[in-house]
């Protein structure tokens, strides 16, 4: 039972569309479900949706395809939307075999099953500096869309050709929150944040070579941003940025 | 002229409370003011308020007291609120001599002059792990208050005595955005973010010794948070966190 | 001859169950065995059991399967229990061919042959933060069990859902020593140590991505723990933690 | 009320030495005391003694002398022993003025007031590599003594003159737990742990120059120890090591 | 004898303005001067002007004021211009006492004595991101001016207010080589290099706090610049940048 | 339309070789071409040639062969020269299939198509320390040649046999700008810069093992060069060095 | 012509065994050989033997097998001994095909061809801490042997079982110079250096996991050694250690 | 009793100059002296001279002046030479008050008292790159001289003016072992080692700024030296280098 379903039930009771006794029974049944489901190798957290507004998401990294498919089924059984991140083709095949309605986003390396969720208030813009940042940007975009947000993609607008990002000022200003994805020197979030008055979530990527040190250069650049309203998530953490953007967009 | 003043002017015109010609003259005068004012050693950015919703803030670090006082006067002359961060006693004395109405917050090491600004929608909670994190937490609190937010202080609730933060669940859940300040292992943001469904802005502090490496341990801990909705600002950057929290709270 | 066997022999002599001459002969034979056995590529340390309470353990990393099998046989020939850590399938096959009674623990990547060893005084609890920490947690568990301890596994109780670890307070408090395994931000040991009054051995894992830097983030978090009674072993060193836990549990 | 006092009260009731009504009143009074005492700038944790076997300890670093004196009085008011670490002369003077019975340990930079606490089972040995490691070693020693342990000091036995530590084999073997303090290359814990079968708590110190990097070299050396039974605490964390040693010695 | 003086002599001989014998004598005298002058604590390199186009410059860091004054006199005796960098007030006083015509640049912390040197072909622009970068920017400016270049100062144009640097496009484009000085995230060189087609010399500064790590963040950002024509010198090395800019501007 | 073509057109109009109307039409057509061409996954920047003097170059790293071939065709369609760096054999095959006139430089791992471009003023020398630095040195050489420069290759002249580089003094001195490529300790740029009076662009390579840390040792060595006129580009960034050298050589 | 051959020739002339004219011719021929031989991809340094006492050695890392074989032949053609380090099986096959008398040392991954060289004065001892350090230790041993030294191998004597190295005191003391190879905490050189009065060359190895960081822990430990007479070479640099040991042993 | 005195005694007995009984008595008395002398805060190691060829040296860093004076007296009482390193003026005054014959070397910050020690075989050359490296170079020189070596100082010969070091080839080649001291990029040892065939001991110094990181750049450069015969000691460790050079020069 998601927060939205809970709200609908209560509304229905208040408006007389459902009997109190029925609502009572329904709620009791729901509460009798353990908040965890123990699969031996994992505790699936079914109450996260109530605590945090979105159900548990499966980080594909370092889990076996079979384990992932098993967890996926439990999540869907409760009526939650499904999101598997960092899913290679082997994971996709294992999940697809069990969940035919699942969709694979190959650039984002994500698997999703959509469910009705509350819509965000405004738009989430997702800007990226270069072509190689696309997988991370798309992970953020897919995440935000699944969580009920309209997403505006503004890609390949790195600062070395500053007119590219300047020419997108209108689309950027129209967003309620902006995710900015960049590798190498990670300067794009500073420039974007100086142009708008909404929160900017900076995502460093491991794109680059030599002294980019797998994203450290971009991470440090973003942490030291001299612009207001910038905060940073982990290197390559498109999911985290999309999730936080959605949370802000639902305020 | 702040965005709010601009809005009020336009409303007044529409509602006939002010004549179009007068509004025209007033706007022209405003526009004639250069967006920058060049003091030789600095360009004061008077349009930041329009672009970013809050006027320029003075980072006290590495500027001479006289320079700071000079910039402060220009900002106040335009009717903006004043915020000087990282202000030692010498800076305070230089500013106070020129700006008698200024207030000094000694724990936060900040100087402020209040002005009417738009109020945030909900509350900003500011949690800190230990007593030594207070300067950074207070910098965030003073910043958020000056920017028009109600601030809830929840201090000394580090994870080594987990019941301390658990007992504050109600106050934390009541906030629209939470700033979490912590040094040493930096674990508090993860725990807080797991308890609520609003954005958590994590601020690592340089508190600690040995392998805390001046805040790196806390910074890394926060970047790697396994909880949703956590993003991170620079070490000891209370101002940045307070500013971002205000921005989110004004959405 | 293990310390236990030596004790048993002495007891038997004192109680008259064995003749002094026989004990003498037996001890002489034992002493005649060199404390080292030189295999050309390694010196097998047969007296470690006497010096340190447990015989030499084979770290599989960077040794050839044949070398490992050869060392394993020498250890078993002396009546010692066998533990090979970091053993891939090729090592398992080489050892199994020579030691049919060996057991392979695939999650822990360990090979064991049990022998009677002195039992620990209480329980060793092994807690882990996430599913991906299982290999390290199991290496600790298998090690502690082989060394004569009752092990309580408490897995997938990371701090992002703090009620998971809180609901295990009873099992944690019942242990005499606790091993806590965590990657990413490594916050679990602080929380656990704040709940109990027994030693907590923290094991950072290389689980994570981006700024986890192969376990450095978790390592630093644990070293900076603000809770009492926490000490740390090397990244991914489940064996070391299990061994130390056993040593403490045998005090 | 310490755990020991609680136990004594219950024993007295069972044995009829105290009336149930009196015990009831006494326990009620105790429970009415808030587990925290809020001093505005700190929450003094009076129940830590119950949860963790030893009351709250004051880390002097980054707190004002007056604040420390104020917290010290609250701790002593409840009948707890007092320990202030990292206490400079100014802190000592502030505390001494309010607590005349306090003792200052100048090498350890610690302030203590002794109280009756349960005695540890065996001895705690504290070994140090060089003369410059003394402040950290003494912090560990003072901590362990205050917590009820007999402490054996074995100083200046670094590995560059290996016979020094070898000649202390008897005293080391007689301990139930050993704290080993070393800077520079941090090799002493490995050598000690190879000689005994009890837990070794390694404390890296920031002693050294150049590539010792403020203790990192010693820290890494200790984390990579090839000997069994070694775990590590933070650089210069003599208190943490002494506290953990006491905890193990009370098992 | 500078390269220009040598050229003038040769021209004079060719044009008959000076007799071959006189030129011969003059050159012999010059050659008889040792290329080094040994002051005991330093070897003054008088031929550097011939090899590298500019005489030896004195890095004030880590030399005694008296030593610096002594070297300064030797350099001036040969008719070379004088440049002392990183010169505090004590150095200034020691040099001024011996060299009354010397000039002190207090922001740049540099001491100079001008001499006629060949003029650069075009202009050297020096841009800086913030007010706190001024000392490094001025060190570059003073160096380039002393070496015969027209310098265009474009200060306080950091990327967080991108219109500031955009509005300086004309002055930037008019330069033959540009030095860009920036701390914090170090993004300015990328933006500038994307706007022009001349070499950009990036100078990271140690300005910033927290994760700026004394200029490492800016350094890494600049090394990873995605724009063409950017190269980097050491942190705070204004002298090196000014010197290289002059070298390029003399091509 | 390259800057050279634009110049030629204007000259032709001035000299009456082309009619104003025709020039007008031609320029209009050119301007009607969007400065960007959006391929969905990338924005090809056709005006870079005008802004920066050389058209967009394709960094092969992290792009699919098909994407690279598609971008290559658009660049060639506009009459620009083509340069693809970090191109493996698969990329070469994809590009070659579409662009038969392309040339593959296997040591440099680069693909080029030559076009008439303005010639540089002097020579670009490219020196390398060891045989293993060849791929990076050749990337610089191929880049500089394509951009219209005469290139002098001076390879395998590392400082451990100092006479090797000394014997090349004449060829080095004859260059207008020098690229120096070195791994391991990265000392060659200092030695070369001390011998000449032209700019030295230092390129650290990831060649080496152990404490070379993938080029960090060489990078730091070069940043700390005590010689004048040295600046540094990213590790292994032969392209960046060749491009900057060309830019300087066209001044 | 090696230094020994040169000496023999001069002795023969002095003693009348060879005619001055013949020696003259022979020396002229030798000198006519260029000190370098340019293979296009490498400059083979044939005079290194004269300058440094041993001919050029081929580092196999990052060179093609064919290149290595070609360089090997040139070295052997001049009568020099051959040493190829870091030679995989493919390199061995390429060299063996051209040089049938070559020998492959598979643990050391080295290829050698022996020649008569001057003998060292005493013995070179090579000690290693663990079995996994063997490849590096053997590289040192093979190098030293080829360069004319008697080598004493003392393997698997790590400090965790301190009696192992103590029992080798006689063999260690008998050496004129000692190479000590160790990974993990790298403590063995300190212990060895404290037992002897000859130079100890410490070689850190990349053996270990977690916080050993590919040999950094061992490297730092060795640099910070508190014992006299220890110096350090690069991580895994067995060749460098063997070569230096030989140089010292030939003094 | 030093090794030399012991040898003299034995020679005298063999040659009949001393009676066996007297030698016996003398040796007995010597042996009765404990190898350690326990001062409470330090164990003075009087047998180091026998084990390592030179008596204990006092590292002044982190010891109180009184402690140092006390240890100094014990060392002199046994007839050993005295060396105190890292001795500030306060230490010098404390020692001088007790040891009037002591000499202070202010550049080297060392205190010495000479005694007759065995002379080294050849010369020790000590080269330094710049003026600021003098304190470290002099520490090495003073150490080597005290230990019985002729020292050749070759200062201020950094690689940026390569002819400076080339012109010292004769003096360098005449040494039996060379200490090379350099900060910044640390390239000098590679160049020197390429010119000679004797061991080169490289000492990185913390001289430099910015990315020199307190000597790390120089340290890494030296560890990665591509020249034969180079080994490295800790940053600023002039004493260690001088001591090792003496040890090699006494072989």
Image: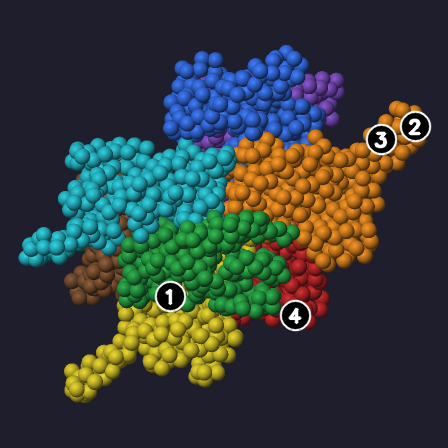
Chain colours: A blue, B orange, C cyan, D green, E red, F purple, G brown, H yellow
Q: Position of residue F250 (x, y in %)?
A: 60, 38
CA gap, disc 3 to disc 4? 63 Å
Q: Classify 10 Å Cα crowding around label 1: few (below 14), some (14-19), many (20 and above).
A: some
Q: Which residue is at a point 68% across and 29% down the rendered structure image?
A: A166
> Dot 2 lies on which element?
loop
Asked if badges 1 and 4 are on one and the same chain, I answer no
Q: How many marks?
A: 4
CA gap, disc 1 to disc 3? 76 Å
Identify the mark at residue E94; answer none if there is no mark: 4
Asked if badges 2 and 4 are on one and the same chain, I answer no
CA gap, disc 2 to disc 3? 10 Å
Asked if residue C87 is positioned above or below residue B73 in the image, the reply reads above
The residue closer to the viewer here, G136 or C22, is C22
Residue tagged 1: D153
Tags 2 and 4 touching, CB below 8 Å:
no
Q: Which is closer to the viewer, label 2 or label 4?
A: 2
The mark that comes first in sequence, 2 or 3, is 3
Kindly indicate the quadrant of the structure image that contains residue B96. bottom right
> Dot 3 lies on which element?
helix
Give left or right: position of H184 versus G53. right
CA gap, disc 1 to disc 4? 54 Å
Residue tagged 3: B8
Q: Which residue is at a point 45% across and 83% down the rendered structure image?
A: H98
CA gap, disc 2 to disc 1? 86 Å
Q: Which is closer to the viewer, label 3 or label 4?
A: 3
Residue tagged 2: B17
Tell which subunit mark 2 falls on.
B
Kindly indicate the quadrant of the structure image that contains residue B115. top right
Identify the mark at residue D222; answer none if there is no mark: none
């Amino acid at each position: 039972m998601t927060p939205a379903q809970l709200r609908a039930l209560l509304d229905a009771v208040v408006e007389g569309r459902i009997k109190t006794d029925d609502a009572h029974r329904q709620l009791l049944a729901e509460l009798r479900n353990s908040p965890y489901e123990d699969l031996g190798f994992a505790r699936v957290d079914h109450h996260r949706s109530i605590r945090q507004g979105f159900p548990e998401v499966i980080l594909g990294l370092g889990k076996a395809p079979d384990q992932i498919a098993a967890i996926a089924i439990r999540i869907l059984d409760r009526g939650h939307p499904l999101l598997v991140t960092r899913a290679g083709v082997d994971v996709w095949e294992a999940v697809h075999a069990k969940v035919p309605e699942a969709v694979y986003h190959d650039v984002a390396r994500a698997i999703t099953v959509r469910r009705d969720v509350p819509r965000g208030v405004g738009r989430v813009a997702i800007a990226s500096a270069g072509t190689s940042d696309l997988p991370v940007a798309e992970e953020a975009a897919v995440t935000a869309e699944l969580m009920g947000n309209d997403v505006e993609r503004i890609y390949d607008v790195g600062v070395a050709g500053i007119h590219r990002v300047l020419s997108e000022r209108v689309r950027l200003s129209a967003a309620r929150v902006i995710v900015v994805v960049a590798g190498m020197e990670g300067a794009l979030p500073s420039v974007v944040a100086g142009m708008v008055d909404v929160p900017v979530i900076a995502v460093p990527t491991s794109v680059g070579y030599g002294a980019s040190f797998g994203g450290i250069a971009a991470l440090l650049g973003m942490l030291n941003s001299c612009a207001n309203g910038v905060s940073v998530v982990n290197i390559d953490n498109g999911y985290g940025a999309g999730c936080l953007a959605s949370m802000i967009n639902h305020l």
